[in-house]
Image (cartoon, coloured by chain):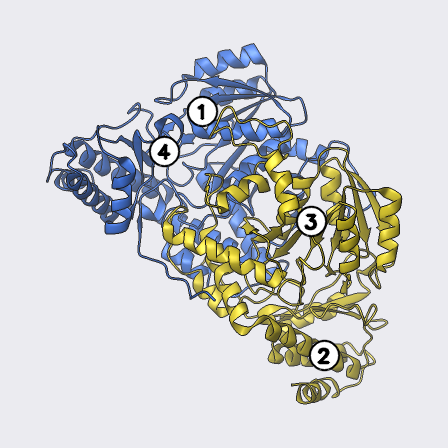
Chain colours: A blue, B yellow
Amino acid sequence: MFNELAIPQRTIMTPGPVEAHPAVLQAMTRRILGQFDPAFLTIMDEVKEMIKQPFGTTNKEAFAIDGTSRSGLEAALIALIEPGDKVLIPAYGRFAYLLGEICERARAEVRYLEKEWTAPFAPDAVIAEIDAFNPKIVAMVHGETANGQMQPLAEIGQYCRANNIFFVVDMVATYGGVPLAVDEWCVDIAIAGTQKCLSVPSGLALVTYNDRVEDVLDARYQKELGLSKTDRNERHIASNYLDLSQLQRYWNQERINHHTEATSMIYALHEGLRVLLQEGLSEVYHRHARNEGALIAGLKAMGLNLYGAADTKMPTVTPVFIPEGIDGEAVRNMLLDDFGVEIASSFGDLKGKIWRIGNMGYSSRKENILHVLAALEGALLYHQAPIQSGQAVPAALRFYQNNI
Amino acid sequence: MFNELAIPQRTIMTPGPVEAHPAVLQAMTRRILGQFDPAFLTIMDEVKEMIKQPFGTTNKEAFAIDGTSRSGLEAALIALIEPGDKVLIPAYGRFAYLLGEICERARAEVRYLEKEWTAPFAPDAVIAEIDAFNPKIVAMVHGETANGQMQPLAEIGQYCRANNIFFVVDMVATYGGVPLAVDEWCVDIAIAGTQKCLSVPSGLALVTYNDRVEDVLDARYQKELGLSKTDRNERHIASNYLDLSQLQRYWNQERINHHTEATSMIYALHEGLRVLLQEGLSEVYHRHARNEGALIAGLKAMGLNLYGAADTKMPTVTPVFIPEGIDGEAVRNMLLDDFGVEIASSFGDLKGKIWRIGNMGYSSRKENILHVLAALEGALLYHQAPIQSGQAVPAALRFYQNNI
């Protein structure tokens, strides 16, 4: 027999999951409501409207999928892909390959446009490849958590729109932390998660899409066999669970019986969105940018070097080189075990070369920035890294004073 | 701008989602842990072990999928199905067609064996169809919430095993409320949910499978492109998100980076399982059976008639005919609006003909049974239904006294 949960205190400075907002945690203690209880349907309707705001969209459709962020990526891609469709994946980081993996499994013809991970694409490079490959879909990551770089989207989106190509964008790591403009950037489907800048636990994916996508969904909708034995559709989406054409009809007034909505997670999402919008989106983005500035000031004062291009860096993730001769995992373990501070390692070629420090949502607080700088300095000095001591925290404090 | 959540008080007597256990709701207020934090991995390991017990299995593999119950059904079926594989679906209720829908979307060749919904199959009937169709997989529902009937599984399972056929069983509506014997019944993959007898919110699916399935998963495993560019596999599972071969390697010591586990839902699951096992499985099953007996005694004393065969009825769902001339939805709405009590309608041919009263998990309490009987009597009398007044609650109370 096991004991009651024992949860140690943590300061989470990874690119997710991050600390949940107290109002979000409190919301999950509320009693269950039936999935078609009018009181619950009202909550779903409010969630739909609130989801749209950080996306920067007036799309009719926006809702949550009961799965983690990548369930939303898969739902979005398989909604559009039919076997043999051509998808272009410009890859400047690890999560582009997740998009590609999903497309390949959906039997698309996938072409990767690859480059160094230190910076995103110049829009022209993507546009040239679009001309060469003539894809049905271009799928990109807005903010790559693996390397902390962020892709400018507007030019690519406008080119896709002009050429009747679908533009699908993973905004998981930027939603709620960075200004987004889904409509202006001509993004047809955008996907986000809850466990990053929204300060909600992992477990839901957020999606919004426009009429161009809805037309495809209408053409592919197949009413489930348990509800109708006659409404068959040759072009139906391959998954039942991740079928946006059904999910939309569950979240809308039609209210088809698809799954049983994840009650407590929807409560959490409602409160996460509500406190975000109450703080004000521009205030939220300013808070993230300010905390990023202080973190960078501290890291540089310590003598550490940042990875990647500065002008395209994500405010929400700061990749930093592990000093020569230092065992990155030993330092990470000391941070966790002795300071209760969690930072992240990375993937692929960057594994063992950089750490990634998150700055997301409720974790993006001044005291957390100061705590991670002090803890990292202490752990690095303990491991005899050649850094400047006593510089990081004052530098961050000065940054805060000079940047209100 | 929207207000803080307003959740009305409800007594939920539907077949799910049901009331969450207070210890479960409390667990969700706990702070977030990183997905690879050793403290969180310990919780995952404990959850794995606890999941097995209500399933009645010593399988090595048991874990949660971050999606509602049907995500587990889809994950289980697509793990085994390759295009053209033959699947037999014996259908004695609505959710068998969900299994079929999933199989059809996975490009299986599906045959349905259909019958009246009033009782499950005689095992011989299924075995005869297995001989006629020679399927690779037989997929069945253990307890059909739509009509409240429960399928005896042992003979069918043993026949499948002897003939090297995979036996996949949906135990969503019986897990934690009815004794299960996955190993003894020769079930290769069993799937359950959280929002029914486990008294945990909706949002996770539970799955367990044996070595026969694990061999298939090993043969089909494809390491994700973001983690390896060389480990490709022609037979890979069609979905990335619902790929059991990857999920297993996330839950096991290999700890591949797949999704970000749904932290708070896993806390909730841990506590839901823990309080269930602490009460004791035989005590839990007895509680459900006793509350069912009292409910039936009350409904019959009122003069209402139950739907379906009595000897194969699920203890966790009681389908009852709507009295002649009564608008079932008007009564349901009155129960919800005026009494705060929720009962369910049904699907397909049974829509408008029966109500379904749930008796699951934390909702399966004496005070809830007495409350739903009193409320239903009041609402029916208000609607001038020809029922016995003043009989239901005393009959239930007498049943409780005579059946400790």
In the structure shown, which secondary structural element does the residue marked by tag 3 occupy? loop
Numbered label attached to residue A254 = 3
Task: Work out whether disc 2 and disc 1 sit on a shared chain.
Answer: no
| Residue contact at pointers 4 and 2, CB within 8 angstroms | no
Horizontal arrangement in the rendering, residue B254 relative to residue B359 (left or right): left
Residue indicated by mark 1: A153
- The residue lying at 54 percent from left, 47 percent from top is A48
Amino acid at dot 2: Gly
Between the residue at mark 4 and the residue at mark 3, the CA separation in whole angstroms equals 44 Å
Numbered label attached to residue B141 = none
Between disc 4 and disc 1, the foreground one is 4
Horizontal arrangement in the rendering, residue A264 relative to residue B107 (left or right): left
Numbered label attached to residue A346 = 4
- The residue lying at 88 percent from left, 51 percent from top is B128
Task: Work out whether disc 1 and disc 3 sit on a shared chain.
Answer: yes
Instruction: Write down the chain letter for disc 1.
Output: A
**N-terminal label among 1 and 3:** 1
Residue indicated by mark 2: B293
Q: Where is residue B373 drawn, in percent x and y?
A: 69, 79
Between the residue at mark 3 and the residue at mark 2, the CA separation in whole angstroms equals 37 Å
Disc 2 crowd rating (10 Å Cα; few below 14, some 14-19, many 20+) is some
Task: Work out whether disc 3 and disc 2 sit on a shared chain.
Answer: no
Q: Where is residue A351 drawn, in percent x and y?
A: 35, 31
In the structure shown, which secondary structural element does the residue marked by tag 4 occupy? loop
Q: Relative to the observer, which residue lies in front, A292 or B18?
A: B18
Between the residue at mark 2 and the residue at mark 1, the CA separation in whole angstroms equals 63 Å
- The residue lying at 11 percent from left, 34 percent from top is A388
| Residue contact at pointers 4 and 3, CB within 8 angstroms | no
Amino acid at dot 1: Leu
